[in-house]
Image: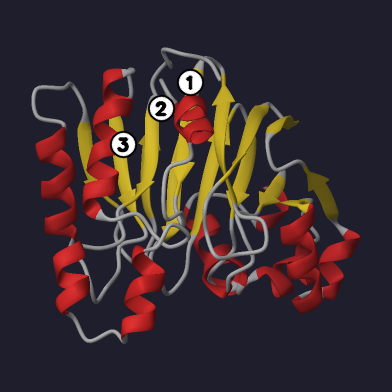
Amino acid sequence: MLTVHILASGSEGNSLLVSGKGTHVLLDAGISARRITAALRELGLSPRDLSGVLLTHEHSDHVSGLATLVKQYRPPLYATVGTARAVCRRVPAAADVLRAIPRQGTFDVGDIRVTVFPTSHDAAESVDYRFDCGGSAVGVLTDTGCVPPAAEDILRGVGLMVLESNHDVEWLLSGPYPYYLKQRILGACGHLSNNDAAFLAQRLAASGTRQFVLAHLSRENNTPERARQAVSLALSGLDASVTVAPRGQLSGPYGAEVFICSA
């Protein structure tokens, strides 16, 4: 069975670990390499146990620890061509361990089958992933202003879904952020709101998803209680649980049950 540990989640930094059959894949490195190493040690692992590091996009809250991680441990790095170019401008050493992947397609990292799909974010070539191993499946969707149809199709039936629930729209609109930043967050290349997450969660739960972990919550424009309440209300009457990933700290394990539909 696949398990997920979230090393950190939120605007200050994002990183999570997907594990299955002895394969360990790090998704993003948006916290320091020291914090990544410490979190892995708590799980009985080291960065040398990583089968690969996958990137969603090049924003600093997803790659800030990458330079040191690559320099010290040289894990295989998986990224689309657009993301790779953007990252290598900041971290030239990344080119030495880079393995380019398509923006949509399937490949294997150890015993984990990885499906990559495009997202809608103000980055060079943003993507997210589905992970399959041993009859279980995990989906991840964060840092996107909308849900592309292909993404929903690929994510249908995963047992565990890590889903962005970034902001409460009313809080954002009435909050202190400048107008341009509010428009960026609310736009098609911004972030999913609580209502967006609730709508998608309801559709995925109907396809068999049984566990949702809400991630990438804004500190200024959301609370764990508001995010959980919005999604839980949408899942009323459906056999699914909702958890909120704590900001900036290790949480998990979250486990994926046998999936219903394959990608």
In the rendered image, residue 224, in percent from the top left (x then y), is placed at 18, 59
Residue positioned 26% across, 63% down in the render: 167
Q: Amino acid at mark 3?
A: Leu
Regarding mark 2 in the picture, which secondary structure is present there?
loop
Mark toward the start of the polypeptide (3 vs 2)? 3
Q: Image check: 107 left or right of 30?
A: right
Q: CA distance from mark 3 to mark 2?
A: 18 Å
Q: Amino acid at mark 1?
A: Ser
In the rendered image, residue 23, in percent from the top left (x then y), is placed at 65, 35
Are there few (<14), some (14-19), or many (20+) residues within 10 Å of tag 2? many
In the rendered structure, find residue 136 and report the number of the disc placed on it.
1
Residue positioned 14% across, 35% down in the render: 234
Regarding mark 3 in the picture, which secondary structure is present there?
helix
* Residue under label 3: 200
Does the image show residue 248? no
When the figure is inspected, residue 104 is found, relative to residue 60, above or below; the finding is: above
